[in-house]
Amino acid sequence: MKSILISNLVADMKLQGFYLCLEKKILKKKDGSIYLNLLLQDKSGVIRARIWDNVQRLSKKFSIGDPVAVKGITYQYGENLLIKIENISRADEKKYKQYGFNASDLIPLSKKNPNELWKELDKEINLISKSHLKKLTREILKDHKNKFKIYPASISYHYNYQNGLIEQTVSLLKIAKQIGSHYEVDIDLLISGVCLHQIGKLYSINLGSVVSKSSHKSLVGNAIISRDVVNKYISKVKNFPDEDKLRLEHLILSYQGRKEWQSPVEPQTLEAILLHSINFIDSKINFMRRDES
């Protein structure tokens, strides 16, 4: 079967296609019975979908963040186009490649050129004055360049498109420079933290045969993975100051802000508070803009 892009869907169209499940919520009808409210995505856009029948059985066949194979029909509800899903299951390349499944078709591209974003990123790294932080940041990003330019920042929330990770990193750098100078923090440390705190996502997100969160992330957590990657490189930098190692490690482990948000620790330094705050604001704004588009 040939998957139909979301941008090409019209009302009353029968379809079979592959999409990425961004949201999955159980809601109640007026009669008290349940239905599933989904948000699906491919590289062309997003669309709402509903599962009205066989809810319990079909709900067990996929999770948020999964690529899914969908069979259904489109319908118009007010000004919105939706999909009424008749059947759905988690899609993987091994099973569905012969039907045209390609994971890269599920993630849209950033509107910004990743090569130009990389130049901006490289320029900011050159401005780091502490030689050990500059060397560390440059080496890690150089070794991860190909993935860093392609990967999304997340699967189902902010910057969830190809090149999203580097786009968000450059956005955070611009904010960090302005707000960091205002509060007179260690700007070198903050810039290094901005560049490196999400490096673990290159290990915790599967982008290829399947678009999903890896089991590694679910068991360990992205912040821990990022910390471990950075510490591995720190061990190769001669005479890396212990204090900066500790402060950078704290930046990475605390960027999610709160323990109830799966943060291993909460921010306890000015740089950590700023990194969490600008990350939260920037992610929220990107998500809202996507939802409005």
Image (cartoon, rainbow, N blue to C red):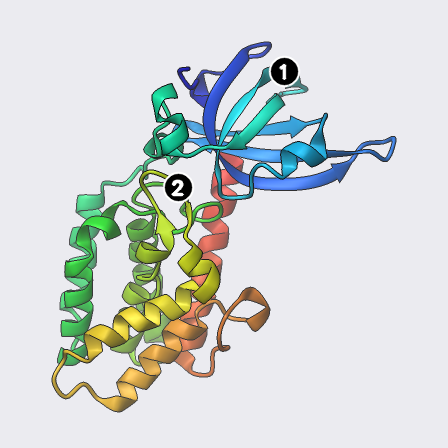
Query: In the figure, 119 relative to 5: above or below?
Result: below
Residue at image coords 37%, 56%: 204
Residue at image coords 47%, 40%: 290
Q: Which residue is tagged 2?
A: 211
Pointer 1 local density, CA inside 10 Å: few below 14, some 14–19, many at least 20? some
Q: Can you tell which of label 1 and label 2 is closer to the viewer?
A: 2
Q: Position of residue 282 (x, y in %)?
A: 44, 56
Q: Which residue is tagged 1?
A: 75
Q: Position of residue 36 (x, y in %)?
A: 68, 34
Query: In the figure, 239 relative to 20: above or below?
Result: below
Say what amino acid the circle numbered 2 marks: Val
Residue at image coords 41%, 76%: 272
On screen, residue 171 versus residue 142, left or right, reads: right
Tell me which label, 1 or 2, sits earlier in the chain.
1
Residue at image coords 19%, 65%: 140
Say what amino acid the circle numbered 1 marks: Tyr
Q: Secondary structure at mark 2?
A: loop
Would you say residue 227 is visible in this rendering?
Answer: yes
**For residue 271, which quarter of the picture?**
bottom left
**For residue 216, which quarter of the picture?**
bottom left
On screen, residue 203 versus residue 52, left or right, reads: left
Disc assigned to residue 190: none
Does the residue at mark 1 contact the one at mark 2 (Cβ under 8 Å)?
no
Between 252 and 73, the one nearer to me in the picture: 73
**For residue 4, which quarter of the picture?**
top left
